[in-house]
Amino acid sequence: MKNEIEKFLQLSLYTLSHHNSTYFIHQLAVDAFAAQTADEKTKPIKIIFALVGLYLVIEQGRSGRDAQLAHMRLAKNKGDWPSITLPVARGYINVADVLKTKEGVLRDEKIMDWCKEVWMAYSASHEEIRKLMRERLK
């Protein structure tokens, strides 16, 4: 896992210096990485926030900035967060694959593909995330 974190930090240098700050691609990478690398020790709130971000970007066509704002709104909701069943397989694209892709449009597209793969891996939890969005982000 240490190697994966190092790779994610390397990718973060790219995403945080990205010129399209309105779209905020860094949030997409954060959410994909969090959902893909979650384990039984990961707090439910981290998994929920990651899946909410992926939901907004993949299903709603929103930006990473919109996902970040949703996280901020959700953080104001106190209470318990539902437990999400972690899928065994979480997509065939990972942070190393993204880093191997040439910087620029191709890497940005790879990040989006990564998000789609991870979101689809959690298909059993999609309805739970939609319900949470309806209830907590009215």
Image (spheres, rainbow, N blue to C red):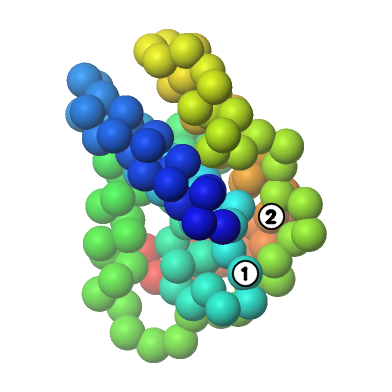
Residue at x 60%, y 52% (from the top left corner): 36
User: In the image, what residue occupies the spot 47% across and 13% down?
Assistant: 102
Q: Amino acid at mark 1?
A: Asp
Q: Residue furthest right?
A: 88
Please name the residue shown 25% across and 25% down the image: 18
> Is residue 54 at least partly visible in the picture?
no
Q: Is residue 105 above or below residue 11?
A: above
Secondary structure found at label 1: loop
Q: Which image quarter holds the N terminus?
A: bottom right
- Residue that numbered label 1 is attached to: 39
Q: Which quadrant holds residue 22?
A: top left
Q: Residues within 10 Å of mark 2 (few under 14, many from 20)?
A: many
Name which residue lies at 53% across and 28% down.
98
Q: Earlier in the sequence, mark 1 or mark 2?
A: 1
Q: Is residue 132 above or below residue 97?
A: below
Is residue 67 shown to the viewer in this render?
yes
Q: Amino acid at mark 2?
A: Tyr
Label 1 to label 2: alpha-carbon separation: 13 Å
Of all residues shown, which one is farthest toward the front? 3
In the rendered image, the quadrant that contains the C terminus is bottom left
Could you say which is closer to the camera, residue 85 or residue 104? 104
* x, y percent for residue 10: 37, 37
Residue 77 in the figure: left or right of residue 83: left
Pointer 2 residue: 122
Query: Measured from the top left, where is residue 115 in percent x and y?
Result: 55, 38
* Residue 105 x %, y %: 42, 11
Please provide percent x and percent y for residue 108. Answer: 44, 21
SS class of the residue under badge 2? loop
Q: Are marks 1 and 2 in contact (CB under 8 Å)?
A: no
Q: Residues within 10 Å of mark 1 (few under 14, many from 20)?
A: few
Q: Nearer the viewer, mark 1 or mark 2?
A: 1
